[in-house]
């Protein structure tokens, strides 16, 4: 069962471990089942996009990846 977290969507957090250590950002999404959060501007990855009706070209887009909840701490804004 997923646990409750003290970090909520919209909170300001600082990454305390990993490649983005020291960066701060807003929590865009909380993933309780994965025990992770998605932070704006942190842990960016290139995602391939297939061509479709809306996007004829396809290509690559940058997207934020989840960060484990233990690797972030809440920052007072």
Image: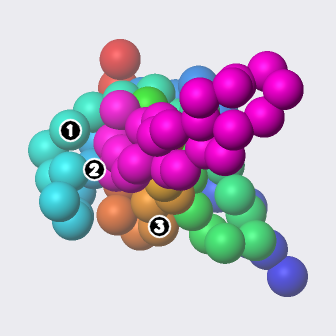
Look at the picture and state if 22 lies above or below 57. below
Q: Percent position (x, y) of residue 17?
A: 21, 64
Query: Which image quarter holds the C terminus?
Result: top left
Label 2: which residue? Answer: 15
Q: Percent position (x, y) of residue 30?
A: 66, 49
C-beta proximity under 8 Å, tags 2 and 1: yes
SS assignment at label 1: loop
* Residue 71 appears left or right of 30: left
Query: Image quadrant of residue 19?
Result: bottom left
SS assignment at label 2: strand
Label 3: which residue? Answer: 68
Sequence-first tag of 2 and 1: 2
Sequence-first tag of 3 and 2: 2
Whole-number angstrom distance, CA of label 1 to CA of label 3: 15 Å
Residue at 45 percent across and 60 percent down: it is 67
Query: Image quadrant of residue 23?
Result: top left
Sequence-first tag of 1 and 3: 1
* Residue 57 appears left or right of 60: right
Q: Point out the stretch of residues depicted in magenta.
A: 41-62
Magenta stretch: includes residue 12: no
Q: Percent position (x, y) of residue 65?
A: 48, 54
Whole-number angstrom distance, CA of label 3 to CA of label 2: 10 Å
* Residue 12 appears left or right of 27: left
């Amino acid at each position: 069962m997923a646990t409750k977290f003290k970090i909520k969507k919209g909170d300001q957090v600082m990454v305390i471990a990993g490649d983005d250590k020291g960066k701060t950002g807003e929590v865009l999404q909380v993933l309780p089942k994965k025990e992770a959060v998605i932070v704006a501007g942190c842990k960016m990855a290139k995602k391939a996009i297939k061509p479709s009706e809306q996007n004829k070209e396809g290509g690559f887009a940058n997207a934020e990846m989840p960060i484990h909840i233990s690797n972030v701490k809440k920052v007072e804004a």
